[in-house]
Image (cartoon, rainbow, N blue to C red):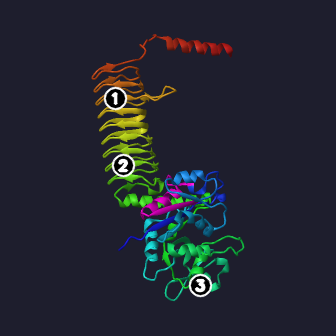
């Protein structure tokens, strides 16, 4: 079968007034990614020939977020049909199929978009395919009215619907697929003779039917087409996205001890037999290999964890943390831009930044790599099998050789040779009886004041 071109138009010009935000609505994040980014990811899975994002005036931040995809500007907020018209200049002469979707509907899936395109290409050759849904409470949604052949006859807005039409449970979800050869004319004929004087994309169905063209419906789960217009709706979409991500993780072989308290990002990757404790947060950029255990109350971001490692509880892995196989990162440990090699242990109350921890090295409690001098970051290198005593400060740039031992409480400022012992602390002195005399003096002073 010959390739039929596909274009996607994403409407993202809405100001999102109800969000009460200085940031454009479609840039608000769901699972660590701007909403419009989720829509672009779904679109990209279809391998379209053209993608156009329609933005409002001054939305340079949205244009930057969707680059390298081109943007068209809807100069005035005059309705959804007018927004699609804004993209016409970038689609001039296009005669393939065109899917129109919304930048604030981040849960739509590639499978649903493919179903719309497939329906558009069916033998009945519909000019328009509308995405429908059957919510538990149809409420004030527009209703999709089908004809005797199962085709879409019209879209009726709730306020204009009769009692019989309001009883219909099939509702308009807003997304549409068009035959590009007929789309430009159909949308060009949409008028604005309505209470808001806006150009509504839904009017194309009536225009197509009056012209004798077929229209069709594809149904999606209501949860896929939830739009965001407020912070409360953003929270609801986040909840739905997290449910989807948790299910995918468990379906792929991970154990979530308390799924409802685990937060994923859109790009979190968990291997088989990973165990995730309660209240773990995966910020963007985390990859976890097979057989890792992440104990409760950990926060991970831009981190890679190799097989068999144990993390937490209460560990924070910041960008650039690279945890090797069978390594242990314990409670109240922070790792940033550092490699922890195979079998190394950093078990508690430690900061490791801009460093390499060699294989099977052991880092004692309270150890700090002093990586920042107020102007620049420097590197600490700890060799394989080294032992760093508790409460040590390693002042970068510095290296600790393989098998070396750093005595507890040391401040290390220069290189330590392999297998050497370094101790850097003030000499201990004892003043016999001093504490007793001190207490007696204080008690006497207190008695005199009385």
Circle on res. 45: none
Q: Earlier in the sequence, mark 1 or mark 3?
A: 3
Tell me if residue 252 comes above or below residue 64 in the rendering: below
Q: Which residue is mark 3?
A: 210
Give the quadrant of the N terminus: bottom left
Q: Which residue is mark 1?
A: 382
**Percent of width and height locating residue 36:** 53, 58
Q: Secondary structure at mark 3?
A: helix
Q: Which one is nearer the viewer's eye here, 9 or 155?
A: 9
**Percent of width and height locating residue 99:** 50, 69
Q: CA distance from mark 1 to mark 3?
A: 77 Å
Q: Are marks 1 and 2 in contact (CB under 8 Å)?
A: no
Dot 2, how many residues are within 10 Å of its Cα: few (below 14), some (14-19), or many (20+)? many
**Magenta segment, which residues?**
27-54
Q: Residue furthest right?
A: 195
Give the quadrant of the C terminus: top right
């Amino acid at each position: 079968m010959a390739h039929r071109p596909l274009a996607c138009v994403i409407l993202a010009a809405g100001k999102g007034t109800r969000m009460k935000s200085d940031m454009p609505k479609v840039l608000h994040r769901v699972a660590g990614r701007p909403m419009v980014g989720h829509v672009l990811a779904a679109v990209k899975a279809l391998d379209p020939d053209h993608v156009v994002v329609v933005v409002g005036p001054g939305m340079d931040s949205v244009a930057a977020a969707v680059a390298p995809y081109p943007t068209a500007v809807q100069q005035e907020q005059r309705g959804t049909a007018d927004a699609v018209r804004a993209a016409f200049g970038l689609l001039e002469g296009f005669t393939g199929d065109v899917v129109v979707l919304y930048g604030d509907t981040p849960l739509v899936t590639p499978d649903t978009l493919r179903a719309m395109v497939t329906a558009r290409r069916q033998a009945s050759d519909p000019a328009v395919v509308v995405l429908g849904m059957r919510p538990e409470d149809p409420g004030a949604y527009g209703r999709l009215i089908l004809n005797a052949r199962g085709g879409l006859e019209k879209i009726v807005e709730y306020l204009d619907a009769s009692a019989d039409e309001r009883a219909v449970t099939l509702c308009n979800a807003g997304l549409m697929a068009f035959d590009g050869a007929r789309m430009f004319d159909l949308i060009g004929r949409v008028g604005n003779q309505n209470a808001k004087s806006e150009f509504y994309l839904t009017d194309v169905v009536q225009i197509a039917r009056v012209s004798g063209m077929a229209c069709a419906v594809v149904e999606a789960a209501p949860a896929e087409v939830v739009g965001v217009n407020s912070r409360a709706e953003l929270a609801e979409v986040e909840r739905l996205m997290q449910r989807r991500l948790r299910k995918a993780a468990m379906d792929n072989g991970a154990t979530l001890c308390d799924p409802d308290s685990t937060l994923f990002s859109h790009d979190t990757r968990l291997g088989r037999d990973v165990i995730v404790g309660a209240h773990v947060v995966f910020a963007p950029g985390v990859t976890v290999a097979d057989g890792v255990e992440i104990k409760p109350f950990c926060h991970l971001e831009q981190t890679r964890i190799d097989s068999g490692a144990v993390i937490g509880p209460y560990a924070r892995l910041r960008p650039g943390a690279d945890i090797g196989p069978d390594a242990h990162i314990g409670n109240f440990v922070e790792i940033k831009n550092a490699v922890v090699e195979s079998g190394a242990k950093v078990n508690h109350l430690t900061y490791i930044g801009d460093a390499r921890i060699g294989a099977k090295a052991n880092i004692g409690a309270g150890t700090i790599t002093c990586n920042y001098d107020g102007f620049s970051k420097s590197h600490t290198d700890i060799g394989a099998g080294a032992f760093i005593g508790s409460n040590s400060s390693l002042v970068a740039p510095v290296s600790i050789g393989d098998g070396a031992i750093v005595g507890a409480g040391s401040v290390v400022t220069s290189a330590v040779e392999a297998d050497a012992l370094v101790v850097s602390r003030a000499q201990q002195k004892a003043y016999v009886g001093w504490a007793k005399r001190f207490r007696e003096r204080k008690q006497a002073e207190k008695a005199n004041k009385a």
